[in-house]
Amino acid sequence: MTARDYMFPVLAVEDIVDYCRITYPDLHLTEGDFKNPQPAKLQRFYLLVLEDTSGINPDQLGQAQFHETDVFEHPTVYEEAVPLLKFTLSMQRLMYACGVQDFKLRDLVEPKPKRTVRLVSALINFSRFQNQRMEEVERLKNENAAVKEQHEQLLRVNDELKTKINHIRASRAEQEPELKKLQGEFEEMSMKIEKHHKDQLALQKTLKEMKEGIAEKKASIDHLKVQMLSAKEEGDRLSRQIVQSPERMKTEGERMRNQLMQLKMTKEERQQRGLELRQQVERLEQIDSHCEQGVKLITGIDAELEREREVLAEVTNIRDRVQSQKDVLRDLTAKEQQLRRMLSTKQEKMAKLNIQLQNKVSAGMETLEQYKQERAHYAALQSEDESQKKAIEQQKQALMEEAANNRKRHEKLMTEMAHEKSQLLEQLDSYHTTLGIKWQEVAQKIQANS
């Protein structure tokens, strides 16, 4: 996997050291630890990162469980290798999440500088991303807890409302016959009240007409009384003006008697009419008393109707409350369905996560089996390497002996060559001396000839 295949930026060594100095000050990592990585210190760094990001206790990785070595033929041989394999598998899962899919055991036991920088960059980028998303995760957890609590509260409220609705339905079923009876009585009373209203209006109209007639009769009687008084005064006045004449007195007396008889007859008629009017007044008073009784009866009926209206209003209020509770129940049912859909969605996600986890576990088991095969292969290779190592040691010993012999021969040869070199130098010096002498002789001859 090349550097361009990674989905994260590779950090500089200085940035990595600054991050480690801030996050893990106890490790005291320097640039040299990444330019020349040491397995022990790097594994310590990986353990701390694994603990911070995954929450895995390092003691669980460092201690081999008894059941983990039971599958081997010789468990004691693998007691030291099992924790390292567990650590490798845990780091592989973490590195897979960080975007590195080719993490191997060699990255722990034989780390390379350039690859170590890439792996540490992946861990740092993942840690930073995790820290950035942790607030959102906590918020989602709190929202999930709040939704669960609200769902439980809504379920409790829903149960309470169902109980209340059942109680109201039972009470309504018990009150239904009485309500129907009251409705029938109310309709009957309404018809009676309407009839009484009509009778009362007719009686009030008749009573009004009779009162008007009585008022007219009283006015006529008062007018007649006034006429009688004026006639009496006129008679007295005329009697004082009458001249004492027997014939005239007789005629006047006869006239007065006739007039008196007429007045008596008129008086009797008036008295008879007044008696009739009195009887009519008494009948009207009786009718008035009956009307008052009817009014009282109507008032009582109105009170009963008012009570009926209150009962109907209460029934209507109960119906409205039942309707509102039905609406609330409908809303709660909708919310419950929504929460159930959310729960089913979360369950599907959990099922997918479980499937992914199972796939990862199966992949881990396959990887472990592969590591077992590789270990067996490495063990076979190690035995072959041991034999080859012995052969190489023998060859090395032979080569060392040969090298020693060659060194001795070389030293001897160098000694001989040094001796020959000194002889050559001596010969060269004697040659130069002879040459100088000869050159001087030649020079002297040249001077002599010139």
Image (cartoon, grey):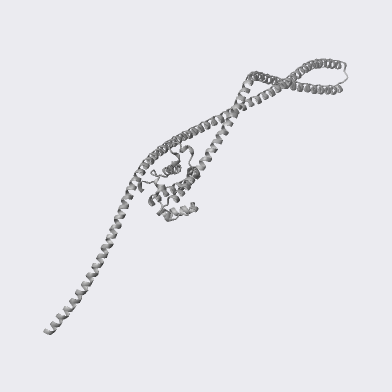
Q: How many marks?
A: 0
Residue 25 lies, in percent from the top left, at 49, 53
Q: Nearer the viewer, residue 277 or 227?
A: 277
Residue 117 lies, in percent from the top left, at 40, 51
Q: Quadrant of the C terminus?
A: bottom left
Q: Nearer the viewer, residue 136 or 104?
A: 104
Residue 333 lies, in percent from the top left, at 53, 30
Relative height, residue 299 to residue 418 (above, below): above
Relative height, residue 217 to residue 27 (above, below): above
Name the quadrant containing residue 82.
top left
Q: Residue furthest left?
A: 449
Q: Is residue 119 left or right of residue 310?
A: left
Name the quadrant containing residue 425.
bottom left
**Residue at the (88%, 16%) spot, across then down:** 246
Q: Is residue 9 visible?
A: no
Name the quadrant containing residue 410.
bottom left
Q: Nearer the viewer, residue 367 or 49?
A: 367
Q: Is residue 90 left or right of residue 194?
A: left
Relative height, residue 252 to residue 443 (above, below): above
Residue 269 lies, in percent from the top left, at 78, 15
Q: Is residue 169 visible?
A: yes
Q: Quadrant of the N terminus?
A: top left
Q: Nearer the viewer, residue 23 or 198?
A: 23
**Residue at the (48%, 44%) spot, across then down:** 62
